[in-house]
Image: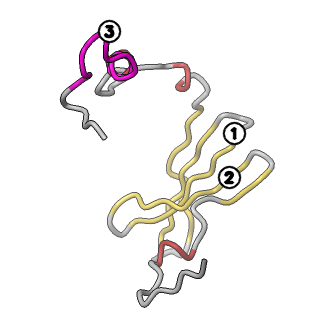
Amino acid sequence: ARQDSILPAAMGQRQPAIAGGAGVFISPAQFQTNIFGFYLLDVDAGTVCAYQFQPGERQLKFIAARDYKFDRRIHNYNTTPSPEEVKNWVEKQENPAGGGAGNPAVGNP
């Protein structure tokens, strides 16, 4: 089906969100209102780096790096609701005879 529109495409639609290959990827980033740069992700090494573009100097500045291999092993850090709560809601939803209608705070589609 043809999808013509009278509205122009949003500027964000004209660029890919991520690019790369062979385990190394780059993604544009907006760190603050007028501060831009990119993330460099090396999935083989398990690292992420951040670079900021400095327009006045016309240079990239290396601003951060992190090894995330151990981060992925944390299952519940500073999140709400907990994964256990979500699991209980799903179980109640999938088995209404065994425990009610689920969490009223979660919408029923």
> Does residue 99 lie above or below 6 as drawn?
above
Considering depth in this image, is 69 or 62 the residue closer to the camera? 69
- Dot 1 surroundings within 10 Å: few (below 14), some, or many (20 or more)? some
Residue 25: which disc? 2
- Can you identify the residue that label 3 sits on? 98
Name the mark on residue 34.
none
> Of the residues shown, which amino acid type is indicated by label 1?
Val
Q: Position of residue 40 (x, y in %)?
A: 62, 51
User: Mark 3 or mark 1, which has the lower sequence index?
Assistant: 1
Q: Main structural element of the magenta stretch: helix, strand or loop?
A: helix
Q: Which residues are magenta?
A: 87-103
Per the image, label 2 sits on a secondary structure element best described as strand
- Residue 84, by quadrant, is top left
- Which numbered disc, 2 or 1, marks the residue that appears first in the sequence? 2
Residue depicted at 25% across the width and 37% down the height: 107
Is 45 placed left or right of 5 in the picture?
Answer: right
Q: Which residue is mark 1?
A: 43
Q: How packed is label 3: few (under 14 Cα within 10 Å), some, or many (20 or more)?
A: few
From the top left corner, tell me how far across and down residue 61 is, in percent: 53, 59
Task: Identify the residue at the far right of this view.
Answer: 22
The answer to whether mark 2 and mark 1 are in CB contact below 8 A is yes
> In the shown orientation, is residue 22 left or right of residue 14?
right
> Closer to the observer: label 3 or label 1?
3
